[in-house]
Amino acid sequence: MDTKLLGLSLLELSYIAASVTFILGLKMLSSPDKARKGNLIAGYGMGLAIAATILFKEEFSPDKWLNYTLIFAGLLIGTVIGVRMALKVKMTAMPQMVSFFNGMGGACAGVISLVEFDHLRHGGEVSMGMLIVILLGLIIGSVSFSGSMIAFGKLEGKIADKALPAGQIINILLLIAIFGLGGFLAISGNLSMPLLFGLLALSLIYGVLFVMPIGGADMPVVISLLNSFTGMAAAFGGFLYGNQAMLTGGILVGSAGTILTVLMCTAMNRSLTNVIIGSFGGGSSASAKTGEQGTIKEISVTDAAILLAYANKVSVVPGYGLAVAQAQHTVHNLEKLLEEKGVELTYAIHPVAGRMPGHMNVLLAEADVPYPKLLEMEDANEDMASTDVVLVIGANDVVNPAAENDPSSPIYGMPVVKVWNAKNIIVLKRSMGKGYAGIENELFFHPKNRMLFGDAKDSLEKLISELKNL
Amino acid sequence: MEEILSLFYENREFIFLIVVSIFLGIEVISNVPAVLHTPLMSGANAIHGVVIIGSIIIMLQADPGNYYALILGFLAVILGTLNVVGGFVVTNRMLEMFKKKSK
């Protein structure tokens, strides 16, 4: 039997198998019980596709020893660094970690295009289709890389939200330049390396300027969007090499990521264009009605503890502040203590609380909070009227009444947790600063509300020791 | 026009695959509960690491004397591996915590 044919058949078979594992993996991620298995299955599929490519794609020739050495060295280096980073990262820093790895994938796609473009210069047939695929892979991969790095830096708190004056116009001009230059390269068949690197630079700059002004509540949407970008870039690579595994994997992520992005936008009642073009936290958000704010009432730890201990039903609304303070275990302890006292405690989870959808679920799961206690926003809102005390821990925008009653507010129309329907509200907050979206929150001035200032973990610990003394 | 048509015709099988995959992706995702959105995003992130195959193909096909391709290809292998390995490990870590809960 022809061994070359056998190898190539095995290669294609492995790609089919890998594509199936990707679909199964994504599918299984939709059920909490199977999700982990799904991830592992997709991982095995990926390993299979990689191994088969190395073994069967080209016949081994001894004079390519350097090529093979570099492949294995690269795999080794990437694995060691990747595993280390992934194991070391704190649960609260997951969103930026995902953003970082996403950026790596985008960079990989961009670099592939750089090599393949050069490859065309050294002979081979140049077709417009191939050029388009290479150029799009470069543009999207680079935007995804630089954008993800900015998102990473922002979530790490290393880069501040900054909007360039006339940023919108600059971005549009950049886009025109990118597509103008790309279009010229594709149509003319001009294989100039300087022009290619010019395109690379423009795309990288666009990625930076694209994410730079987007602040706060929109960051999850941006990461999801960049995720689907990298998927598309991978798919272009698949098109280029006629590789089914890359194609299906990339497209699946591209379309799934887009849907996820849209779902997130819907959760915030905003359109995707609005997210991309208008920045949430920036400039025009000074719409708050500053005149009639009333006064802020503080509550002492003792009073808060008594209020909680004698309540029948308590609802906890967690936000990013909980994550920052690493207070998920502390809040779970408070929950256990209150349950012992016969208080019914649930968590009201806003879909975009934190920095990513489901961020709060991940965090509370880490602290062993049982599933049934995590209520989705709609269910939590139904229960609100019969709730005695709402404990808002480090959440701000997701409990802002302006979303319901202030049409001039940038978050008007976004579904929120209607904590003001409960009998009492206690907001745990570090200071009177604004939320991540930079919007004033009139909840803090609400007659039912009292503030417990301080670090979330600190305040919760004080509450716990106070409760124990009661 | 003719060029575009022939481009379409030559790649009709891939275009078919792309269109079907787009709908498959939408279909597969649409039932994911909000609870699992973060792991899902992370899992999808790992899957697009499949782009690493492209970098391996570059390395396999590169002429041993072509240092431009070898160096960039090597870089791409590292970047792709980071995406794949980091992506799957992070997702697994997130889901590990969910597993305890479901019992």
Image (cartoon, grey):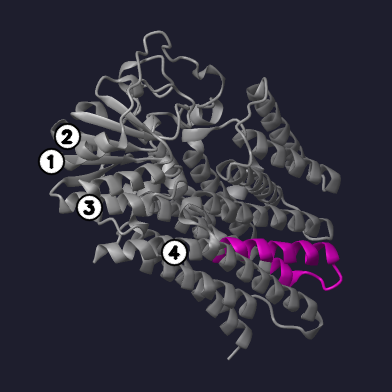
* Residue with the mark numbered 4: B93
Q: In which quarter of the image is residue A73?
A: bottom right
Q: Is mark 1 on a helix, strand or loop?
A: loop
Given the image, on which type of amino acid does mark 2 rest? Asp
Q: What residue type is labelled 3?
A: Leu
Q: Position of residue A403 (x, y in %)?
A: 34, 23
Is label 3 in a helix, a strand or a loop?
helix
Depth check, front residue: A92 or B70: A92
Q: Is A268 positioned to the left or the right of A423 in the image?
A: right
Looking at the picture, does residue A297 appear above or below residue A365?
Answer: above
Q: Disc 4 marks which amino acid?
A: Arg
The 10 Å Cα crowd at callout 4, few under 14, some 14 to 19, many 20 or more, is some
Identify the mark nearer the N-term, 1 or 3. Answer: 1
Same subunit, tags 2 and 4: no
The residue identified by callout 2 is A388
Closer to viewer: mark 3 or mark 4: 3
User: Would you say residue A237 sits in the magenta stretch?
Assistant: no
Marks 3 and 4, how far apart at CA? 28 Å
In the rendered image, which residue does mark 1 sit on?
Answer: A312
The answer to whether residue A24 of the structure is visible from this angle is no
Q: Are marks 3 and 4 in contact (CB under 8 Å)?
A: no
Instruction: Please say if A301 is above or below A269.
Output: below
Q: In this view, does A152 lie to the left or right of A312?
A: right
What residue lies at 70% left-to-right and 58% top-to-bottom? A112
Disc 1/disc 4 C-alpha distance (Å): 36 Å
